[in-house]
Amino acid sequence: MFWHYIDLSWRSFKRTPMVTVLMVLAIAAGIGITMTSLSVYHMMAMDPMPHKSSQLFHPQLNARDDGDDWWTEDNLPHQMTYKDAMNLYRADIPRLKAPSMRTGFSVNLNSPDVKPFIESVRMTSRSFFSMFEFSFIHGAPWSQGQEESAAMVTVISRSMSETLFGQSDSVGENVYFDDNVFQIVGVYEDFDYHVKFYDLTNGAFNRAENAMIPITLIPPLKAQTWGNTNGWKFEEINSYQDMLNSEQAWLQFWVQLDTTEEEKEYREFLTNYLIEQESLGRFEREEVHFALRNLTQWMTYNRVVTEDNRILVSASFMFLTVCLANILGLLLGKFLRRVPEVGVRRALGANKRQVFLQHLVEVGLLGFIGGIIGIGIAQLGLWGVRATYSYYSAIATMDISMLLAAPAIAIGACVIAGIYPAWLVCRTNPAICLKTQ
Amino acid sequence: MLSMKNISKVYQTEKVQTHALRDFTLEVSEGEFIAVTGPSGSGKTTFLNIAGMLESFTSGDFILDGVNVGQLNDNQRADLRNQKIGFIFQGFNLIPDLNLFENVEVPLRYRGIKSAERKRRIMECLEQVGLASRAKHLPQQLSGGQQQRVAIARALAGEPRFLLADEPTGNLDSLMARQVMELLEEINRNGSTIVMVTHDPELARRAPRNIQVVDGQIADFTLYQHGGASVPRKSNTVAAVNPMSVEV
């Protein structure tokens, strides 16, 4: 009967084309607006590494005196001081850990063929690549030895390799970062995540860096952060070494903890580390204070999805509700005009359930068509977002789940709007329906 | 086959109670052709609607083909109606968007009959009413008489035990009315039981049994033999002319 109901629905649409067009446009507009905001929200809130996000942790250390407040909700700094980051980096546990910092250089090949350009570069450890699953298409990350010896090596993205050398394989080539020559040891596939989750302090939706160099090059290069620096006390900083020794927080730090035992062990380690640092006179606290959040907790803590986004999604659903109210009115009029035909069908043996289903299939089909057109409107809306705010270009898009959700939401919404009119029609006494013929 | 005992139907509004049928008692045997006559508002259509289970009744017993209709819920009544009863309406009531084939198909779809069997039955019925060649036409492309023949084909398609016809010739000219009546007589000769409501005394006389309904009750019934010659008329209990509506 389903396909028969579809056939009847199609005939019904053709019988009242203007009303049908109005209803389809109403649902398409509602779905278009809703899916635009919902898609952005979905991409923002989506777990970027669902298979691994519970194993990647971002420690936060409260290495400062009691009474001094950070601006965060739990009084913990988002970033780490250089000495804490390097101490944790050189610790025995865990196996995979990655201090990192965003810096930047003028990139050139010392050749007139390629115009120099400014590019942000991440300084990190080789563990970073396996922790965040960077995929190498040529070469590999630098070696442990190269990292320890602060070798002038780099890995770059495919797009940078193609920009510089016109091909993806540039392993063995040299590239200048400012005046320093770096040898390319690996080329990785462009970072394809919509959220730059490994460094939320520099804008969650900013473009990922196209080149990485060892973290151990910070002192020799006297690298400056291209991100935020936060401190909690007055310090005289007259040299780069003063900066490295200071209580200024400007590095991010990640660890991979595969089991709950590892997590527990690392929490104990951090407790002991802070007790030890306090004993060295860095700060005075009554209680040790730190946090160890996994990737999704870290995204929530950093409000990757802002309150504004939630309000926008709510408002768009309200708009959809208004569209549905209009559709409900149109459906009432359309279905009640059909009462005589329903009377005939009832007299010929249709029961209430069959009449009800026939009408629900009709509104479902209406929702499906509206949903498909709504996807087109949503694409237009997302294009508008991308064109207006380049910052959101990575997330103003519809993934497959949103493409499937659009018609599903449209059908569901139309069915909800159609329940009352369909119920009204199916409960009409067939004898009275026939009298109206 | 159809047995109504003391059926009453009361329409109740806030101020007025209207007795559409009162103590209506009727037995219909298999293969009968009964004409129901009576003045407007006498309760003929209410009787037909109750017989077709389109309306419920207030009190009494109604047995249709061994099934106690009073004990059925709405869905069960719809199923029984689909299986046992075919309707023919004064206004034809064909669905304008559907062609003749699809119109005749409607009751068969609700019965869940397979496509091939549906097609066989539809073409057979359209053949019977002489419209098989116009199966793809829409109702509005046909004359009134032809539309009524399609409605008869639709009523026959489900092979019902009963055909209930409400003024089947009411919207037709005399020639077409005669053709439709001949068709109904042929269907009756083939074994179908027909109950027909009509205003036309001439048409009513062609039915072997006539029932006259007055004020919601059977006032008279007459038996005819071979289309016109009446046998002694039996008087039923005729109530004094009662007002149909009483103040409550």
Image (cartoon, coloured by chain):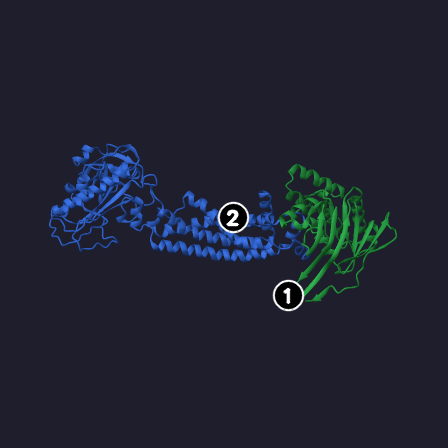
Chain colours: A blue, B green
Residue type, numbered disc 1: Glu
A99 relative to A328, above or below: above
Between B123 and B109, the residue placed more toward the observer is: B109
Residue type, numbered disc 2: Ile
Does residue A323 appear to the left or right of B174 in the view shown? left
The chain letter for the residue carrying disc 1 is: B
The chain letter for the residue carrying disc 2 is: A
Element type at mark 1: loop
Between B10 and B209, the residue placed more toward the observer is: B10
Does residue A302 appear to the left or right of B143 in the view shown? left
Question: Are there few (<14), some (14-19), or many (20+) residues within 10 Å of tag 1?
Answer: few
Cα–Cα span, label 1 and label 2: 46 Å
Front label number (1 vs 2)? 1
Element type at mark 2: helix
Q: Position of residue B110 (x, y in %)?
A: 64, 44
Does residue B23 appear to the left or right of B230 in the view shown? left
Question: Are there few (<14), some (14-19), or many (20+) residues within 10 Å of tag 2?
Answer: some
Examine the image and state in which quarter residue B102 appears: top right
Q: Which quadrant: the C terminus of chain A? A: bottom right
Q: Which quadrant: the N terminus of chain A? A: top right
Instruction: Determine if residue A117 is in view.
Output: no
Identify the mark at residue A369; answer none if there is no mark.
Answer: 2
Instruction: Determine if residue A259 is in view.
Output: yes
Q: Residue at x 45, y 56 (%)?
A: A319
Between A299 and A426, the residue placed more toward the observer is: A426
Q: Position of residue A295 (x, y in %)?
A: 30, 44
Q: Position of residue B224 (x, y in %)?
A: 85, 50
Q: Are marks 1 and 2 on the same chain?
A: no
Q: Position of residue B111 (x, y in %)?
A: 65, 43
Does residue A52 appear to the left or right of A172 in the view shown? right
Dot 1 corresponds to which residue? B14
